[in-house]
Image (tube, helix red, strand yellow):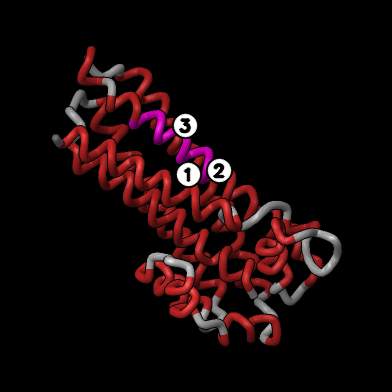
């Protein structure tokens, strides 16, 4: 029964993430080619984030970091779900420790790079700041109404609104960094357990799935806001 519940949860998480990502992906695509030119709606969100910078010359740099961080997080999630597959089939012939460790190592490495990218964004936030006029639309945005109209998770949107409703992109990026750090800690803990030969409990796997889900949705909901304004 526990195994079936876990399978169902994994499916629900994947479906929820995929449907949300179809709208704007985490932060969109290449922000350097967005803006009011002929970029197209698929890259609008990242362009808007980059264009909030006071120094327009920083748009390309922060946009590249956003895309890199989002890409690494997605790749990490892919490796984590492959690790979950190793755990799922372990009941048939035992857990393949080497394969599981390989997946966890790759997942952790990608999260670590995503975190480094976000910390570089935080440095730019502090050094350059954001244009007050360009953040006015963030402050005026109806976050609760948007979440309700689009069937989004109100708790996650409230977390996003804590920062964006104040035009506080620095705080938003710092929180995203904390989410990534928490995810990295869980992956490191799982690696330690595997190396020690400990059996992985369901609650550990649930914790991993929950952290991926909440981390990705936090970033994605911000992207949806930028896609809309």
* Residue bounds of the magenta highlight: 72-84
Task: Tell me what residue is drawn at x 47 percent, y 59 percent.
Answer: 177
Which percent across, then down, holds residue 152? 43, 65
The crowd level at tag 3 (other Cα within 10 Å; few <14, some 14-19, many 20+) is some
* Majority secondary structure in the magenta region: helix
**Quarter of the N terminus within the rendering:** top left
What residue is shown with label 1? 111
**104 is higher (above) or lower (below) than 61:** above
Which percent across, then down, holds residue 14? 41, 44
What residue is shown with label 2? 72
Residue 26 within the segment the image draws in magenta: no
Residue 71 occupies which quadrant of the picture?
top right
- CB of mark 2 within 8 Å of CB of mark 1? yes
Q: CA distance from mark 2 to mark 3?
A: 10 Å
Q: CA distance from mark 1 to mark 3?
A: 9 Å
Residue 61 occupies which quadrant of the picture?
bottom right
Q: Is residue 170 left or right of residue 136?
A: left
Q: CA distance from mark 2 to mark 1?
A: 6 Å
Task: Tell me what residue is drawn at x 28 percent, y 27 percent.
Answer: 87
Task: Tell me what residue is drawn at x 32 percent, y 50 percent.
Answer: 210
């Amino acid at each position: 029964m526990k195994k079936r519940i876990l399978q169902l949860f994994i499916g629900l998480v994947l479906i929820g993430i995929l449907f949300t990502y179809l709208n704007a992906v985490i932060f969109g695509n290449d922000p350097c080619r967005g803006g009011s030119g002929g970029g197209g709606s698929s890259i609008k969100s990242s362009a808007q984030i980059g264009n909030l910078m006071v120094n327009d010359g920083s748009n390309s740099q922060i946009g590249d970091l956003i895309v890199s961080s989002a890409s690494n997080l997605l790749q990490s999630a892919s490796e984590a779900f492959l690790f979950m597959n190793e755990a799922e089939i372990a009941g048939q012939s035992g857990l393949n420790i080497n394969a599981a460790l390989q997946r966890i190592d790759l997942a952790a490495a990608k999260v670590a790079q995503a975190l480094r990218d976000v910390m570089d964004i935080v440095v730019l936030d502090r050094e350059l700041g954001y244009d007050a006029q360009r953040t006015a639309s963030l402050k005026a945005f109806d976050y609760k109404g948007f979440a309700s109209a689009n069937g989004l998770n109100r708790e996650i949107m409230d977390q996003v609104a804590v920062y964006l409703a104040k035009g506080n992109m620095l705080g938003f990026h710092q929180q995203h960094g904390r989410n990534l750090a928490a995810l990295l800690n869980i992956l490191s803990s799982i690696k330690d357990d595997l190396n020690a030969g400990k059996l992985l409990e369901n609650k550990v796997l649930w914790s991993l799935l929950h952290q991926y889900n909440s981390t990705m949705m936090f970033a994605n909901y911000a992207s949806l806001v930028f896609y809309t304004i």
